[in-house]
Image: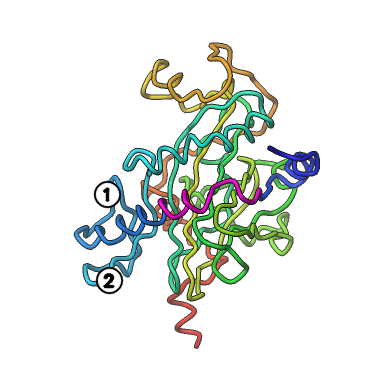
Amino acid sequence: MLSAAQRDAYERDGFIVVPGVFSLAEIDELRRVTDEFVRNAAAVTANDEVYDLEDTHSRDEPRVRRLKAPHLIDPAYFRASRNGKVVAILKELWGSVRFDTGKLNMKSAGYGAPVEWHQDWAFYPHTNDDLAAVGIMLDDVDRENGPMLVVPGSHKGPVYDHHGRDGRFCGAIDPQRGDLDFSRAMPCLGKAGSVTVHHVRAVHGSATNLSGRERRFLLFQYRAADAWPLLGFKDGIEKFDELLLAGEPTLEPRLAPVPVRLPLPSAVHQGSIYENQRASGRRYFMTAERAVAAE
């Protein structure tokens, strides 16, 4: 699935974009299902187990920020999470693949919320860092509609502090720190059906979608079979092994000398990363409200 140049780029930069992984028919199905969930959100008034809502959400104008664990709520999302081409890509990188979880970030036209700079590693450290998130582009992604931005090479650096001034986890890096040059960040661009693969330690974020076009991004998290979560797996070993997609189960976690910082004490606002980052007070990206106020 991957060329030598793509494997080298992933090792060097910590992310790649692979075009044409999902067919147009698969993308059309995912879009139809997603549109239906957004319509149904009109009956929802607060964040729940399925929906993470924009602050401006209303019954008359449903605005969904994220669908939580989409692979658990519709077969189309479940099939996408087990896509054979995706598994083959990750198997080339690690040799084995275990599913973790997923989410669908909506980035709706004109107001899709930003995600502040962070590392996924800060949320779920493991015994080694053979972990990545795969993002499926449900829409064409360009520089205008809030693409994911990644600081190249940051996956080889430290795990940055994602705690607020109160000492609690907040899921965001302080954008004022002087040892990270965010101007070097590269956008992940591509046509619908392309996928991104970004390393769990890569520093990334995304701006508000102020364009007139959707940017729906279906993200699934994966790990090597011998990468075990340091915070434990509450559902037990049988359920853990049911998530294995390639390779053999093992009771011998691989311990790698990688930097770790636990996400404790827990965030004041529990839930999605959007909720976690509410308490951070850290804003690098302009929100839709600030953009309107600046006009």
SS state under label 2? loop
Classify 131 as above or below 15: above
Tell me where the magenta segment starts and ends, as one range: 18-29
Mark nearer the N terminus (2 vs 1): 1
The amino acid on which the numbered mark 2 sits, given as a three-letter code, is Glu
Residue at the spot of label 2: 61
Q: Residue at x 43, y 76 (%)?
A: 289
Say how many tags the image has. Answer: 2
Residue 48 badge = 1
Along the line of sight, the residue nearer the viewer: 198 or 96: 96
Q: Residue at x 38, y 49 (%)?
A: 268
In depth, the one of 217 and 208 nearer the eye is: 217
Residue farthest toward the bottom in the current orientation of the protein: 295
Q: Position of residue 132 (x, y in %)?
A: 59, 38
**For the residues marked 2 and 1, what is the alpha-carbon distance in whole angstroms?**
18 Å
Task: Say left or right for 282 vs 200.
Answer: left
Q: Residue at x 30, y 57 (%)?
A: 36
Q: Residue furthest front?
A: 25
Disc 1 crowd, CA 10 A, few/some/many (<14, 14-19, 20+): few
As drawn, the residue found furthest toward the left would be 43
Residue drawn at x 47%, y 28% is 231
Q: Quadrant of residue 101?
A: top left
